[in-house]
Image: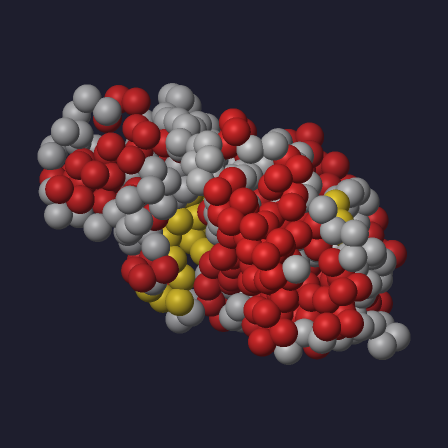
Amino acid sequence: MRRHSAILSFLLLLLSSLPVAALDKGAVEARFQTWLQQELWPLAEKSGVSRNAFERATAGLHLNWDLPDLVPPGSKPPKERKQSQAEFSSPGSYFSENRLQGLAAAGRGLATRHARTLQKIEKTYGVPGSVVLAIWGRETGFGQAKLPYPAVEVLATKAFMSTRKDLFLRELIAALHMIDGGDISAGRMMGSWAGALGQPQFMPTSYLEHAVDFDRDGVRDIWSSVPDSLASIANYLVHKGWQRGRSWGYEVVIPEAVSCAQEGPDRAQPLSAWVATGIRRISGKPFPDREAAASTMMLVPAGTHGPEFLVTPNFYVLKEYNNSDLYALFIGNLADRIAYGSGPFVGKWGDVGKMLRSDVLAMQETLVAKDYDVGKVDGLPGYKTRRSLGEWQAKSGFSPTCFPDESLKAKLR
């Protein structure tokens, strides 16, 4: 038996060194089964997972070859392709008016249907019901989206062979703890192709830390319980720093004399200081008096090519749910539509051309060479990249726009 085991181990090692074209799925599947027992189980056991729960979760488990971003043993990760995404091509495409109107209409109906639950959630956590509803609607269409993937299968496949194995290994072990703790069975743990679970789309680590049993039936059920799902979203936001009694932010008009290169949470000022520069709400309404001394930040997600905002720390809490300015703005706008019947942002999203991620990356590298802080050099125009670009434009005699566009590709060298 030992000889056979040694031979099998040698063959698996040999197979792992072959190019992916020489590997068949059966060989990879065999290696996966060995990985489950020889690598995953020791890690799970060390973290406190029982053998019984492990066997229940992995019985009959196989790889899912239809998932994206897989890197089978012996193959190389795919080369990064040029990308053109909403954050750096046309931000306005992220805000489908038809979709927002549909979600807002459904959200207002659900606000009435679940009024008592939402009032209790707001009293308990301080998060407005409209914000919770907006996230629920954006993530799973108010719980109507299908979750077709067995989460353990997804997480195990990606922990074994994906571009982010460490992340998915951590989430897989968290899922095993959920099963071991009696939160849910492996068969009922359904999620997305990325392993996000239930109506709030929590990863398993988020479930363990933030999910709550709000209907008090003894189970933290984010798959079929609306109270548990909504309260878990609110609890997540509170744990990430949600400030009770504050909005997410306001659409504003920034005078031409005020530089757009002042955004970011590290350049916060009291709201009164921004107002003193001439910034005003685009609606014409005054800012709430209670906000005058409160910390507030400029946000120009498309520079001068789009709507402009003053946001509160709660905006950055929304980004904890999905680290994207546009996502947080989508949630904020949808929440306002549900709560107040408001409409789209007044400012128009301009056309900045079809900027590729590689184009933005080249601009970032040039700015860094000129001693500007762009944050992470990754081809994504975050607030540090936007404001550094605006600072360079002003220093170079150009009118600051604070956003990469095609006209700047030849100028910034």
| Residue 219 coordinates in the image, percent (x, y) | 83, 72
Name the residue located 61 percent from the left edge and 32 percent from the top edge: 24
Name the residue located 83 percent from the left edge and 56 percent from the top edge: 187
Query: How are the residues colored?
Result: secondary structure
How many numbered callouts? 0
| Residue 231 coordinates in the image, percent (x, y) | 73, 67
Q: Is residue 4 left or right of residue 286?
A: right
> Depth check: 84 or 392 in front?
84
Q: Is residue 363 visible?
A: yes
Name the residue located 17 percent from the left edge and 44 percent from the top edge: 368
> Depth check: 73 or 375 in front?
73
Q: Is residue 53 left or right of residue 256?
A: right
| Residue 330 coordinates in the image, percent (x, y) | 58, 44
Q: Is residue 235 visible?
A: no
Above or below for 287 versus 124 = above
The C terminus sits in image quarter: top left
| Residue 82 coordinates in the image, percent (x, y) | 39, 27
